[in-house]
Image (cartoon, grey):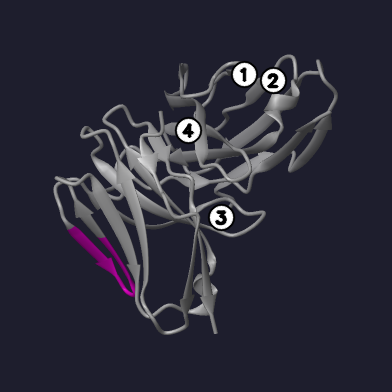
Amino acid sequence: NAGVTQTPKFRILKIGQSMTLQCTQDMNHNYMYWYRQDPGMGLKLIYYSVGAGITDKGEVPNGYNVSRSTTEDFPLRLELAAPSQTSVYFCASRGRGGNTGELFFGEGSRLTVL
Amino acid sequence: DQQVKQNSPSLSVQEGRISILNCDYTNSMFDYFLWYKKYPAEGPTFLISISSIKDKNEDGRFTVFLNKSAKHLSLHIVPSQPGDSAVYFCAARNTGNQFYFGTGTSLTVIP
C-alpha cells in the first residue's frame, strides 16, 4: 500500500524561484492537508481540501497556492520562494467516514531556500 | 494563537515505568483529539484518539484521558519501552475538519 506519497523528498531553492511539491494518495480519501513543520515547532496547517475542486486556507497560507483537480492529487505551489519558507512539508489525507479522525501522513519534503 | 499546547518539550522515563504526556487546548469546539508519534525523517503516525464525548480510550499500553472542563488531555504509556522513544504530538480537530497540532514532546525511554 502506497498511502500518501510526496515528491521530492529534498529540494534546495534560490530566493525568488518557484516550485511545486507533489502529493498523491491512493486511499480515495476526500480530505487532504498540507502542513509545515519548523524546528522545535508543531505542524502548522497551510491549506486543506474537503474534496476535488474545493480548497481553503489554513493557519499559514501566505506565499503558497494549492489546487485539487482530482481526488488523488493535492499539489502545493510556492511562487516566489523566501528563506522563511525553509521547512519540512507534510501532506496528509483522511477518509470521510471512520470514528478515529485519523490523518495519514506522507514522509515529508524538506525544502531549503537560500 | 496556539490552540493546542504541549508545555513539556521533553520527558525522560525509565524502561518499564509509566510515561505521561500532557496537552492543553483552548477551543471548546474541538470534537476529536488525537496523539501522533513521529520518528526523525518520517511523517507522523497515528497512535490513539478520543472523541470529545468520552473521557478515556485505551489501546494496549496506550491510554488517553480527556478532561473537558479543564481542556486537558493526557497520554499514558504503560509500561514504557525503548522503542517508544520518539516525538509525540497532540492534535485536535474542529467541526470544520481542520486539525491543529501542539509543538510536540520528545520522549526518551532509558533502558
Q: Which of the 4 image quarters holds residue B3?
A: top left
- Determine whether label 2 and label 4 are within 8 Å by CB: no
Place of residue A102 in the rendered image (x, y in percent of width and height, measured from the top left): 38, 48
- Residue B84 lies left or right of residue B67; in this view the side is right
Mark closest to the chain's N terminus, 2 or 1: 1
Helix, strand or loop under label 3: loop
- Determine whether label 1 and label 3 are within 8 Å by CB: no
Nearest-to-viewer mark from 2 and 4: 2
Q: Residues within 10 Å of mark 3 (few under 14, many from 20)?
A: few
Secondary structure mostly seen in magenta is strand
- Residue B80 lies left or right of residue A44; in this view the side is left
Residue on which disc 2 sits: A78
Identified by mark 4, the residue type is Met
Identified by mark 1, the residue type is Tyr
- Residue B108, above or below A2: below
Nearest-to-viewer mark from 4 and 3: 4
Q: Residues within 10 Å of mark 1 (few under 14, many from 20)?
A: some
Q: CA distance from mark 2 to mark 1?
A: 5 Å
Helix, strand or loop under label 2: strand
Q: Which mark is residue A32?
A: 4
Mark closest to the chain's N terminus, 4 or 1: 4
Q: Residue at x 19, y 47 (%)?
A: B70
Residue on which disc 1 sits: A64
Q: CA distance from mark 2 to mark 4?
A: 18 Å
Q: Which of the 4 image quarters holds residue B100?
A: top left
Callout 1: residue from which chain?
A
Residue on which disc 3 sits: A1
Magenta segment: B56-64
Mark closest to the chain's N terminus, 1 or 3: 3
Helix, strand or loop under label 4: strand
- Determine whether label 2 and label 1 are within 8 Å by CB: yes
